[in-house]
Image: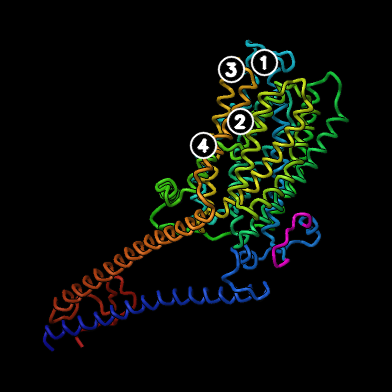
Amino acid sequence: MTPKLISQEVEGEAKEEINSLSNSEGDEENGVFKVANEHESSDSWDIKAFEKALDGRSSDNLSPSEIAVLENEILIPKWLRFIEYPFKIKNKKGDFLIEATGWSMDAAARGPLNQAGTYFGACLLTLASVEAGCNGIFCGEDNRIYGMKPSSLLTTVTAVVSVLAALVMPVVGAIVDHSYHRKTIGSLTAVAVLIATGSQIGISESNWFIILCLEALGGLSLMVHTTSVFTYMPDLSLDEAQIVKYSTGFHIRRYVISSMFTAACTLYSFFSRVDGDMIGNQIRLCRFAASLAFSIAAILLGYAWIFCFRKRQPSRKKPVEKSLVSVGFSSVCKSLGRILGCISKYRALRWLMISMLFSPEAGAGAVLSIATTFLTIYFRMTALQLSNTVLIFFSFHVPGSIISQFLCNNFNPFISYRVALATFAISSAITAVVLNPEQIWLVYIFSGIWGFAFGCFYSTQRVLFCNLIPQGKQFEYMGFFAFFGNLLSWLPPILFTILNERGVSMRIGFALLPIFSFVALFFTLFMGSYSDALQAVEVMEEESWQSDAESDAVMMSTQEETRETTLASTQEYIIDSVRTLGCSDLNGGCRRSPAYRGPHMGPNFGWNITK
């Protein structure tokens, strides 16, 4: 056999071997796809089981929560099941969804946690006034604490927390949408809030500032936690009416627990008060409220996040070459551009978010800090009077939620939202202009009106959030809602602080709340019709999925080109090597051993060109 023929024979054998390798690699990939398809097939069989478990409904009609619950079963000890019974809400089929129960328990836990902040705020103002050398809560211009009036401390801290939340939330939301960490974020932030609340149990005249710092971190954690739990809400049902029912049920239970909590604090304040001991009364009430809120929240949050909520798959794919942080920032920019870029297509969502910049409900922490300062300093409320006010406020959340459900079902959520805004704006304006410290009984009446407005706020905004968010973008858009809700929430407390520091009457500072509410109400008039808003959401979903599909196609194409280029380069290299090795020594055969394994060749080819 001539050297040329020997070389051609070896080259042919090498090509056949490489082709077999390519085929084996393809078979391996096909095997992976086969396994994936088998996995998908097994999932489809699981969904068949889901359909059987859910009275034969089609898998297309199952909500993400229904699928997640049946796909990830968590055994709950029977002796603990009694905890969830008061928080169960039936769906239209008469069934109880465990994630809906978890949402209800989480909402109920957040009520006492927020209220404990009210008692802590009043106690903080009193202790800061004492350290500044004031006569009780009556401070002069020279009485300062950390360079400011004691009455400005609470609103200043609230402003700082609001700014941090506005900066952090959208990016955190986008990151979670591209990862498996939705439940992890909710669980960890729940623990952080419990730690901050538990620290208030030991508040005293010597450590109040340290506890204030912990409370600031707890407030930020509560905002992140609230955003994480809101992302589960759109998953609960595919039916808008069912979402409205769930939302109303959640908040009724929250306000019932809040009312019971406030009633307990009021009774404790009444029986534990000591005449002439204002500081001691505030400290004792704060400690009791923190102890009770911590106990309730630890039980409800622990049960909800251990047994009720399920893990979620990433709602968006993360490119392999990018980190979660970079993907988060990129996704935020794209989504924000889609929201703000074209008012004609997404006007409802855009104007809703602009309205939220000034909404009292979105920046509820700012309203709470201003109202607590106003009632404690201007109206000189005692611990018992403050408890009575809070009790009335939360008691009227229940009728507000019921009216919200009526307005959403018989008209639309836009109408309900405007009614709530108008109610709060008018009642708070009257409070700022008419009431004085001698009319405490009128404060009780108006606190009921505020509670009605906030009950309507909470229920309506949750419905709007669920219906105006594109599927697969829940956490990210909840981050945007938190962003817009807190972007300017620092402004009322900062303006209140500036006016207070300059000696302006607190009545004018409190008047900022109705002014912002009227501005929010004005912007809602540009949202358009509710039906057009729902159609715009469908367009956003299509564009979002199309954009993701194009990104995935580009990424797959790049990976395929890289694989083909690598394979071709390897083939060329091996053929060249065979040519060189096969023809280099005509008398003594190949210089390499017959067992030589070429680059990336794997098996022993057993070549011997002398045969």
Element type where label 3 sits in the image? helix
Q: Amino acid at mark 4?
A: Leu
Alpha carbon of mark 3 to alpha carbon of mark 2: how far?
18 Å
What stretch of residues is rendered in magenta? 85-94
Q: Are marks 3 and 1 in contact (CB under 8 Å)?
A: no
Using a 10 Å C-alpha cutoff, classify the residue at mark 4 as few (fewer than 14 neighbours), some (14 to 19) or many (20 or more): many
Which residue does the numbered mark 4 point to in the structure image? 487
Alpha carbon of mark 3 to alpha carbon of mark 1: how far?
15 Å
N-terminal-most mark, 3 or 4: 4
Check the image and report above or below for 278 versus 36: above
Residue beneath the point at 49% across and 56% down: 537
Query: Foreground: 354 or 90?
Result: 354
Query: Foreground: 60 or 144?
Result: 60
Element type where label 2 sits in the image? helix
- In the rendered image, which quarter contains the C terminus? bottom left
Indicate left or right for 603 with 494 as reference: left
The dot on residue 513 is 2
Q: Amino acid at mark 3?
A: Glu
Alpha carbon of mark 1 to alpha carbon of mark 4: how far?
32 Å
Alpha carbon of mark 2 to alpha carbon of mark 4: how far?
16 Å
Check the image and report above or below for 573 versus 379: below
Query: Foreground: 220 or 393?
Result: 393
Q: Amino acid at mark 1?
A: Ala
N-terminal-most mark, 1 or 4: 1
Check the image and report above or below for 408 versus 487: below
Q: Are marks 3 and 4 in contact (CB under 8 Å)?
A: no
The residue mark sitting in front, 1 or 2, is 2
Which residue does the numbered mark 1 point to in the structure image? 132
